Image (tube, rainbow, N blue to C red):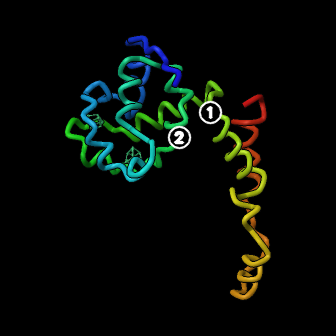
Amino acid sequence: MVRTRLTPSSTFIQELRSMPGGELLEKCLACGVCDASCSVASGTDYNPRQIMQKILVGAREPVLQSEQLWLCKICNLCENTCQYGVKLADVFRIVRHLAIQERKIPAAFQKAAKTILSDGWLMKEAYSDFVSDERKELGLSSRLSQNKRYTNDVKSKYFDNGG
Ligand code: SF4
Ligand code: SF4
């Protein structure tokens, strides 16, 4: 396993702290209670405490390029259990925003987003004749519609210029 050396830096923390939702991030003690309350962490490798630890040591690039960052579903469950008032979901949302701005979205998530933007959903191949027949039986159109204008706006804003 390749280990990334983390370089302590306060500039990343200052950057995040200046944005709404990031104000209390330094209060994190990396206690791991959020891991225990997180529905995504249960049974997966996802570990919100680990992401917070990397943020706290200023590992800007590893965090911005982390796939883990994109697994948080922003459900805010962990905020109810964090004794230190850290708004984890807000912190992750800010970092994701930076990753988008700097075009550092991991390839797997870019691919998923592009698929949704082009097909209207992620599992086009799973839309078999069986599902189509089921929809017809229920009186639903077999064609799934999408808001083309919205998806084109998102596509041109985040993905068309080398993202
Ligand atoms: S965010 Fe809160 S619960 Fe999670 S590790 Fe930090 S202090 Fe603990
Ligand atoms: S907001 Fe993210 S880290 Fe917190 S419980 Fe939900 S999925 Fe887990």
Q: Residue at x 38, y 34 (%)?
A: 21
Q: Residue 105 carries which label?
A: 1
State the image coordinates of residue 97 (x, y, percent, origin top left). 54, 33
Q: Name the residue under label 2.
A: 70
Nearest to N terminus: mark 1 or mark 2: 2
Task: Give the CA separation, mark 1 to mark 2.
Answer: 9 Å
Mark on residue 147? none
As drawn, the residue found furthest toward the front would be: 1
The kind of residue tagged 1 is: Ile
Q: Is ligand 2 closer than 8 angstroms to the Cβ of mark 2? A: no
Q: Residue at x 42, y 27 (%)?
A: 19
User: Where residue 137 sits in the image (x, y, percent)?
Assistant: 73, 88
The residue shown at (61%, 32%) is: 100
Percent position (x, y) of residue 54?
Answer: 40, 24
Judged from the image, the secondary structure of the residue bearing numbered disc 1 is loop
- Quick check: marks 1 and 2 in contact, CB under 8 Å? yes
Is 24 displayed left or right of 110 in the figure? left
Please tell me in which quadrant of the rendered image residue 50 appears: top left
Q: In this view, does 149 lie above or below 95?
A: below
Q: Which amino acid does label 2 sit on?
A: Trp
Residue 117, above or below 54: below
